[in-house]
Image (cartoon, grey):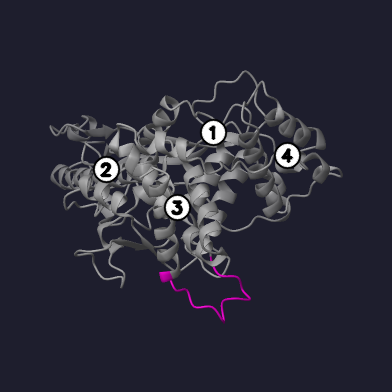
């Protein structure tokens, strides 16, 4: 016959510790973890649920409290670490002009990453890891479009930082991931009445009609106004299907044979237009446009300019005299290992020094008024306002300054100087024979400056 004490449910005065009658144990609910669940349509999905920790049996109140305290401290540490990573990733996305992450939802990491003490590990942590291996056979055909997207992005991400033609940079990956997400209408703010494809459909069940409907959707001006944007979405989806080697029906290639017939838009050199733009009242806008024209920079090159990139002609830290910038081009940093040394015009140098930031933990040459590094979203609108005010909207975009500079350098000097200005890699045939002498680019940039001064632009 049980004792009276065994019939009475024990209590614990520590908030957060509970008695579970079924298992006759003390337990707690600290943190969350992710599990695989099945939705109403029978497809696998990821779900975030409360974690349960069993602390001890009757009569072990002190032991249970000690375990509970250790788990709470470990959970606080996990939350702080994941919050730090979350904020850092949002800051990186902001610098790249990418959409921010969704709401912060911390979870216990996998057991392999989180095992400080046996007491601190939740009972079950089946966090779903996206495999980075290429699926084949039935596994491939049984993947839904949504699952295939996650699998392919995991595979594609492994190429970041590789060399010898196998690599991509992080910005390339982010842009592709964004295009693929938007192409499949899997972004959180999607609000169109219909969708281009059913992402719950399995790859093995996709028909030619599904592919055709997808392509037609993104070619329809009712759904998207930019033809190039639609083409990027179509290419992102096709890249995923092709690289995963999904069996496709006859006529697949014809469906995706989409072109955007247009000639490259290159603004011709016009001194009056440049004079109106570069002599605007907003000196920050003038700085951005001068750096684009002088060095052939895009917004990302300006955002990521660091103090150590500013040098003299011998690539030593800048002290005085002529200023140069020695760095790799951001758009091709994953492909090319070489740096370019670009002469900075005195007019550009004066504005750079005027807006030069103080020493900062980001090591960024420019900081916003809030003390944060520039991002592309803080540069493009400033220049666009100047272009609108000059009545040149549609004729000039940020990249047109680089195109004008390249065209003029080729006319004033030669193709070699133009390729240096654009930070192009030497051709395979030229690499064994040609030495990159950036004095040639310096002379060409000085000629371009003289022309701009003679035409009253500078």
Q: Is the C-beta separation of discs 3 and 2 under 8 Å?
A: no
Q: Residue 331 colored magenta?
A: no
Q: What is the residue that sits farthest to the right in this orientation?
A: 250
Callouts 4 and 2 close, C-beta under 8 Å: no
Q: Where is residue 289 in the image (x, y as percent from the top left)?
A: 39, 43
Which residue in the protein does label 2 denote?
Answer: 79
- Please tell me which residue is depicted at 63% across the width and 37% down the height of the picture: 228
Residue 114 is drawn in which quadrant? bottom left
Farthest residue, direction top? 193
Secondary structure under badge 4? loop
Q: How crowded is mark 1: few (under 14 residues within 10 Å), some or many (20 or more)?
A: some
Measure the C-alpha gap from mark 4 to mark 2: 51 Å
- As drawn, the label of residue 296 is 3
Categorize mark 3 by other alpha carbons within 10 Å: few (<14), some (14-19), many (20+).
many
Task: Give whichever of 148, 283 is nearer the camera.
Answer: 283
Which stretch is magenta?
425-439
Tell me residue 421's x, y (percent): 47, 60
């Amino acid at each position: 016959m049980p004792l009276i004490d065994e019939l009475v449910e024990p209590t614990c005065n520590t908030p957060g510790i509970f008695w579970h009658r079924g298992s006759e144990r003390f337990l707690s609910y600290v943190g969350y973890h992710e599990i695989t669940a099945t939705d109403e349509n029978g497809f696998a999905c990821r779900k975030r649920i409360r974690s349960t920790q069993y602390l001890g049996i009757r009569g072990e109140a002190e032991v249970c409290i000690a375990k509970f305290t250790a788990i709470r401290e470990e959970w606080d540490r996990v939350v702080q670490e994941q919050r730090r990573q979350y904020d850092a990733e949002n800051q990186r996305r902001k610098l790249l002009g990418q959409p921010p992450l969704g709401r912060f939802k911390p979870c216990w990491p996998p057991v392999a990453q989180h095992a400080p003490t046996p007491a601190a590990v939740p009972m079950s942590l089946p966090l779903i890891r996206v495999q980075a291996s290429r699926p084949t056979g039935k596994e491939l055909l049984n993947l839904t479009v949504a699952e295939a997207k996650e699998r392919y992005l995991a595979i594609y991400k492994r190429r970041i930082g590789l060399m010898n033609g196998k690599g991509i940079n992080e910005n390339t990956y982010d842009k592709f991931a964004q295009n693929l997400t938007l192409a499949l209408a899997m972004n959180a703010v999607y609000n169109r009445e219909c969708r281009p494809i059913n992402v719950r459909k399995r790859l093995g069940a996709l028909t030619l009609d599904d592919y055709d409907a997808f392509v037609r959707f993104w070619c329809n001006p009712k759904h998207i106004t930019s033809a190039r944007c639609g083409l990027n979405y179509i290419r992102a989806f096709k890249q995923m299907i092709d690289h995963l080697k999904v069996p496709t029906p006859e006529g697949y290639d014809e469906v995706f044979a989409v072109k955007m017939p247009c000639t490259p838009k290159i603004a011709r050199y016009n001194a009056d237009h440049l004079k109106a733009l570069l002599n605007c009242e907003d000196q920050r806008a003038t700085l951005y446009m001068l750096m684009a024209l002088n060095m052939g920079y895009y917004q990302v090159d300006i955002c990521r300019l660091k103090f150590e990139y500013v040098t003299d002609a011998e690539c030593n830290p800048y002290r005085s005299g002529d200023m140069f910038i020695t760095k790799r081009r951001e758009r091709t940093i994953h492909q090319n290992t070489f740096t370019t040394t670009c002469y900075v015009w005195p007019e550009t140098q004066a504005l750079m020094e005027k807006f030069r930031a103080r020493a900062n933990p980001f090591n960024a040459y420019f900081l916003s008024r809030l003390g944060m590094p520039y991002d592309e979203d803080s540069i493009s609108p400033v220049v666009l306002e100047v272009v609108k005010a000059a009545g040149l909207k549609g004729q000039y975009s940020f990249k047109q300054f680089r195109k004008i500079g390249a065209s003029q350098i080729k006319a004033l000097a030669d193709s070699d100087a133009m390729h240096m200005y654009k930070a192009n890699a030497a051709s395979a045939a030229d690499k064994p024979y040609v030495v990159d002498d950036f004095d040639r680019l310096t002379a060409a940039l000085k000629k371009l400056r003289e022309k701009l001064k003679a035409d009253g632009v500078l």
